[in-house]
Amino acid sequence: KQVEKDLNKAKIFWEKSCNRNDGEGCAALTTFAENKHDALILFKKSCDFGYKFSCDHISNFKDKISEREIGSLLNLTKINPEIDLSWRILKISGVIENTGDNEIIDATIVCELLAESGTKLGDDKVVIYQKFPPHQKKMFANIKMPMVPAQSHHANCFIEKAKFSTSN
């Protein structure tokens, strides 16, 4: 409920700004409904322009963004899951890119383990305890995930969630 109230207040603010022929307000209004991360960016821009309303709401609003939404700002690329059935482990390496404007930490990667037929046998999770600076890529290597089902043939991995760094 509080998030909805904050969103409505911010939307009204941008509507008033747009009605005063403020291009920044109109641009913000058109992208406002896209997602909460966009709204956070707009609050920051508005705060930088001296709008106290936006400055007051940055930290409050940032706390309302879910870890799943924060995780969606990270791209997992060059993922290389290797299944070693003799040891029943999954080893992953890859690159995580932070597409957002805030430092992100502790990315949870989920790997769905699939049989040769494509049947899902289960999944495993691992947290990459690193800092991911804004607009940068970071590599991780040889992360081992134990207890792979015996008939695992391949794995599909994705980022489930993450957190904003408290140093932002």
Image (spheres, rainbow, N blue to C red):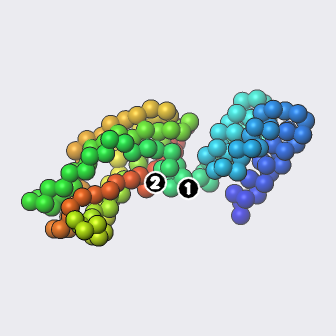
**Closer-to-camera residue (127/83):** 83
Total numbered circles = 2
- Circle nearer the N terminus (1, 2): 1
Residue at the (65%, 39%) spot, across then down: 41
Q: Residue at x 41, y 52 (%)?
A: 159
Residue located 50% across and 49% down the image = 72
Q: Amino acid at mark 1?
A: Ser
Tag 2 secondary structure:
strand
Q: Position of residue 11 (x, y in %)?
A: 79, 49
Camera-side residue: 146 or 20?
20
Q: Which mark is residue 161?
A: 2
Please say if 113 is above or below 39: below
Regarding residue 122, the answer to whether it shows in the image is no
**x, y (%) of residue 134?**
50, 34
Farthest left residue in view: 86
| Residues marked 1 and 2 touching at CB (< 8 Å) | yes
Instruction: State the residue lying farthest toward the top.
Output: 49
Quadrant placement of the N terminus: bottom right
From the image, tell me which residue sits under label 1: 66
Q: Please identify the quadrant where the C terminus is shown.
A: top right
Q: Secondary structure at mark 1?
A: loop
- Please rate how many residues cluster around mark 2, counting C-alpha atoms within 10 Å: few if below 14, some from 14 to 19, many from 20: many
